[in-house]
Amino acid sequence: MLFVEVCIGSACHIKGAPQIVQAFEEAIKDNRLEDEIVLTGCFCSGRCSKVGVTVKVGDRVYTGITPEGFDRFWKENILTALKAEDSGIKQAPSA
């Protein structure tokens, strides 16, 4: 099970959190991953950046996620994390 947490605090909300949440919901449904991904939100991750939204995937934290960059983020980070999880590989936590 992969846990994905999207910051929906005021700064991230202004920078596109609702669109990121919607993109996750659609991607999870389109890829039939409802049983493999748990999507949650938090009110402030404490990792604000000048652009985009903060997203935590497992133990890794990513900042600057934008609606325009979501597809790339999904492919490079979510699908990769799921493959690693399926193969039993543990990803190193982010700094």
Image: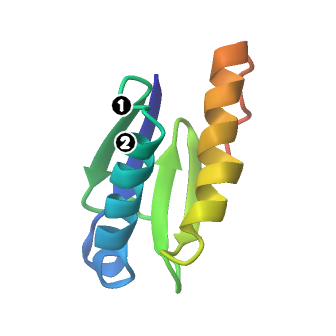
Q: Residue 29 got which mark? A: 2
Amino acid type indicated by mark 1? Glu
Q: Residue 34 got which mark? A: 1
Task: From this view, report whether residue 45 is shown above or below residue 95.
Answer: below
Task: From this view, report whether residue 71 is shown above or below residue 59.
Answer: below
Task: Identify the residue at horizontal 45%, vertical 50% (top origin).
Answer: 27
Task: Identify the residue at horizontal 72%, vertical 31% (top origin).
Answer: 91
Q: Relative to the observer, which residue lies in front, 82 or 30?
A: 30
The x and y percentages for residue 57 are 52, 43
The x and y percentages for residue 6 are 38, 56
The x and y percentages for residue 53 are 45, 70
Secondary element at image label 1: loop
Residue 95: in sight, yes or no? no
Task: From this view, report whether residue 53 is shown above or below residue 1.
Answer: below
Picture colour scheme? rainbow
Q: Residue furthest front?
A: 30
The x and y percentages for residue 35 are 37, 23
CA gap, disc 1 and disc 2 = 6 Å
Asked if disc 1 and disc 2 are in contact, CB closer than 8 Å, the reply is yes
Task: From this view, report whether residue 55 is shown above or below residue 33.
Answer: below
76 sits to left or right of 29: right
Q: Relative to the observer, which residue lies in front, 95 or 69?
A: 69
Q: Residue furthest top?
A: 88
